[in-house]
Image (cartoon, rainbow, N blue to C red):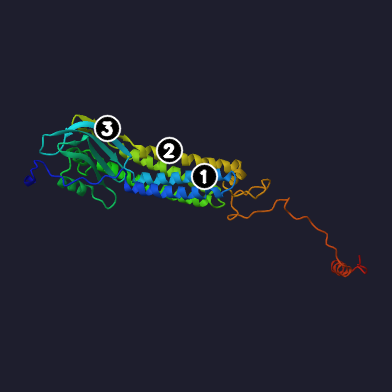
């Protein structure tokens, strides 16, 4: 390194920075494509049902996209501070920069942006990720960061989440991330089942699965909040300032979506009890039925038999019998009577 004229660890180069996580970009692109496809075929739906279908599809796609996106998001716990801090080891040079910390379910993301970006004849714009998902080794990634010679603020924050750190943040957030991610995957499965059941004549069970989707999202938030509050917060001092963290956008949007699913599931259960015909009409399953008919308590022509009402029962008809048929019938019923003709 001395041959290159550097007095502090030489960093080989900056990684290309994408405006957002590529996984999130793929998820958003898939759901936007599905939404655009539906909007294209929307004019083929007649009358007021066009608005109902639009509300259903937009709400369903929003819920599914949120469940998947927050599972891969790094903004469950976030913090940012502007400070004057040392730049690299073995150097007395200080920089003015914005330092950001984003904690997700699978790891941490640390950003360092200079104010201005060009300082000390370098471009200070770092975005580093350290993961602890299954199959990943956080300690090895931190060791590689030391070998590359990342700036001091990045290494300082990354060291706080190592398994050997006295702060205990690694086990705390790793445990929270694993359990929260598992419950979110179950919520996504419930969302898929809810969409399948709402497309069949079993609306009440679709509402139950939608309710389960919201409950599992709220359980995931409960796991995350409980696990992250087991130990007191660890102070994160960066130069002349202290970095404070708080719940990020992924946490609050999951909470909002979970409450939305719970309210929709409860609303469908109440509508099934009080106005089943209106519920079926909203889902375009009773457009050709007579609303005066007695409702089927199981909502399912496929799950339970449908009995006729008295209005639908055929009236008895008088069928005239021939004289020979009448005489034969009378002899069978009264064989001892001599004359049995009508």
Which circle's residue, 3 or 2, is located before the other in the chain? 3
Which numbered mark, 2 or 1, is in the foreground of this view? 1
- The residue lying toward the viewer, choosing from 95 and 252, is 95
Q: Is residue 80 left or right of residue 267?
A: left
Q: Residue furthest top?
A: 240
Residue 320 horizontal/vertical position (percent) = 85, 63
Q: CA distance from mark 3 to mark 2?
A: 24 Å
Which of the two labelled residues, at mark 1 and mark 3, occupies the earlier sequence position? 1
The answer to whether the residue labelled 1 contacts the one labelled 3, judged by CB atoms less than 8 Å apart, is no
Q: Quadrant of residue 325?
A: bottom right
Q: Quadrant of the C terminus?
A: bottom right
Which residue is labeled 1 in the image?
A: 54
Q: Residue at x 57, y 45 (%)?
A: 49
Q: Residue furthest right?
A: 339
Residue 326 falls in image quadrant? bottom right
Q: Residue furthest left?
A: 3
Mark 2 and mark 1: Cα distance apart in space: 21 Å
> As displayed, is residue 89 above or below residue 298?
above
Q: Is residue 306 left or right of residue 16?
A: right
On the picture, is 203 further left or further right than 306? left
Q: Which residue is mark 3?
A: 244
Q: Residue at x 24, y 31 (%)?
A: 82
Mark 1 or mark 3, whichever is nearer to me: 1
Which secondary structure lies at badge 2?
A: helix
Q: Which mark is residue 121?
A: none
Q: CA distance from mark 1 to mark 3?
A: 42 Å
Count the labels in the image: 3
- Dot 2 or dot 1, earlier in sequence: 1
Q: Residues within 10 Å of mark 1 (few under 14, many from 20)?
A: some
Asked if the residue under mark 1 is in contact with the one under mark 2, i.e. CB atoms within 8 Å, the reply is no
Q: Which residue is identified by label 2?
A: 256
Measuring from the top left, give residue 133's x and y in whole percent: 29, 49
């Amino acid at each position: 390194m001395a041959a290159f004229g550097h007095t502090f660890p030489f960093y080989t180069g900056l990684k290309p920075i994408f405006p957002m996580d590529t996984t999130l970009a793929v998820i958003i692109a898939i759901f936007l494509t599905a939404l655009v496809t539906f909007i294209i075929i929307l004019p083929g739906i007649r009358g007021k049902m066009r608005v109902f279908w639009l509300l259903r599809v937009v709400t369903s796609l929003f819920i599914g996209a949120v469940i998947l996106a927050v599972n891969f998001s790094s903004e469950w716990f976030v913090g940012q501070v502007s400070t004057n801090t040392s730049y690299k080891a073995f150097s007395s040079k200080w920089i003015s920069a914005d330092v950001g910390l984003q904690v997700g379910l699978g790891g941490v993301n640390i950003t360092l942006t200079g104010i201005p970006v060009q300082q000390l004849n370098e471009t200070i714009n770092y975005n580093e990720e350290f993961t602890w998902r299954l199959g990943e080794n956080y300690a090895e990634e931190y060791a590689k960061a030391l070998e590359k010679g990342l700036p001091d603020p990045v290494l300082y924050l990354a060291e706080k989440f190592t398994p050997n750190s006295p702060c205990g943040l690694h086990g705390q957030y790793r445990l929270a991330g694993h359990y929260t991610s598992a419950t979110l995957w179950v919520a996504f499965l419930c969302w898929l089942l809810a969409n399948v059941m709402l497309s069949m004549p079993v609306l009440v069970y679709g509402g139950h699965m939608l309710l389960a989707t919201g409950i599992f999202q709220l359980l995931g938030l409960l796991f995350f909040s409980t696990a992250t509050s087991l130990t007191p917060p660890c102070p994160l001092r960066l130069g002349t300032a202290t970095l404070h963290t708080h719940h990020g956008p992924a946490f609050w949007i999951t909470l909002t979506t979970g409450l939305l699913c719970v309210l929709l599931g409860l609303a469908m259960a109440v509508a099934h009890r009080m106005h089943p015909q209106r519920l079926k009409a909203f889902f375009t399953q009773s457009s050709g039925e007579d609303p005066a008919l007695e409702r089927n308590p199981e909502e399912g022509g496929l799950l339970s038999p449908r009995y006729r009402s008295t209005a639908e029962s055929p009236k008895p008809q008088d069928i005239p019998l021939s004289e020979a048929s009448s005489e034969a019938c009378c002899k069978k019923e009264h064989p001892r009577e001599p004359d049995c003709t009508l």
